[in-house]
Amino acid sequence: MARRGAYAKGVAKREEILEAALDVIAREGWHGASVKELAESVGLSQAGLLHYFGSKDELFTAILRKRDEVDSRRFPQEQPVSADRLREGFVSVVRHNAEVPGLVQLFSRLAVEGGDPSHPAHEYFAERSATLRALFTQVFAQQQADGAVTRDVDPETLARLVQAVSDGLQLQWLQDPSVDMAATVDAMFTLLAAHSPGPHDI
């Protein structure tokens, strides 16, 4: 029982750290969120903080996973997911990202570093990309069957385009905060819905 109690306390402390880290990074930005500051926010030493994660890179990867967990609440939970609800949820997440630049900085930085298969974030980004792509592929396939989007491009490619636009916009926005990421992503969905019939649509 003692070991179970210690495990439960460890899980609870890890969650406390991640929730605090989201607040610190959102408030102070990526550059202001040192391991020292994150540790102090939950009453730990740097060594004590990293005890729960193993390394700085694993800590920041876990922070991104926690961010996704929080963001997922903005997505529709019903199955199957309707195109309108998915669009609404996705645009809502993009709009929220503009309010937490530090987390966008962290995501963009680790996305590059995670390209290395040995990096702790590599698996996270691979899983995240595949999950998001599968969701959009499913919805686009249904929309194509309903005649709501073009059938000249296969559903998975459309899903990849959504990912490319949203990730690319984050880099543009970091360079120029006047970019309206949510409005641009929403415009992309409007373009997909307002297509002209192609040769495969007839």
Image (cartoon, rainbow, N blue to C red):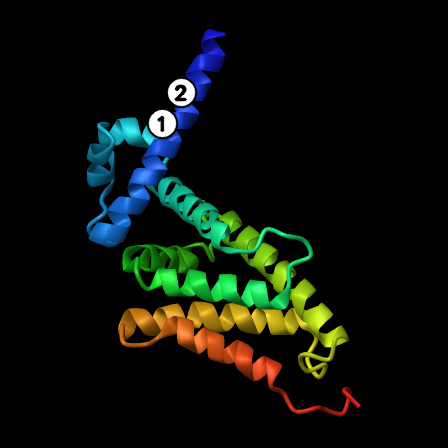
> Badge 2: few (under 14), some or many (20 or more) residues near its Cα, within 10 Å?
few
Which image quadrant for residue 111? bottom left
Label annotation for residue 13: 1
> What element does badge 1 sit on?
helix
Q: Which mark is residue 9?
A: 2
**Residue ID at (41%, 76%):** 183
Answer whether labels 2 and 1 touch (C-beta < 8 Å). yes
Total numbered badges shown on the rendered structure = 2
Q: Nearer the viewer, residue 117 or 22?
A: 22
Residue ranking furthest to the right: 202
Within-10-Å neighbours for mark 1: few <14, some 14–19, many 20+: some
Residue 122 on image: x %, y %: 49, 51
Q: Is 16 displayed left or right of 78 in the figure?
A: left
Q: CA distance from mark 2 to mark 1?
A: 6 Å
Q: What amino acid is labelled 1 in the image?
A: Lys
Query: Horizontal and vertical percent for residue 17?
Result: 33, 34
Front one among 45 and 41: 41
Residue 180: x %, y % from top left: 35, 75
- In the rendered view of the protein, which quadrant contains the C terminus? bottom right
Q: Residue 199 falls in which quadrant of the image?
A: bottom right
Query: Residue 189 is drawn in which quadrant?
Result: bottom right
On the question of residue 53 being in view, the answer is: no
Rendered position, 102 above or below 59: below
The answer to whether 171 appears left or right of 76 in the picture is left
Q: Foreground: 114 or 59?
A: 59
Say what amino acid the circle numbered 2 marks.
Lys
Residue 22's place in the image compared with 145, above or below, is above
Q: In percent of the image, x 62 and y 67: which residue is there?
A: 83
Residue name at image x 20 percent, y 40 percent: 37
SS class of the residue under badge 2? Answer: helix
Instruction: Give residue 175's position: percent from left, percent from top.
Output: 28, 73
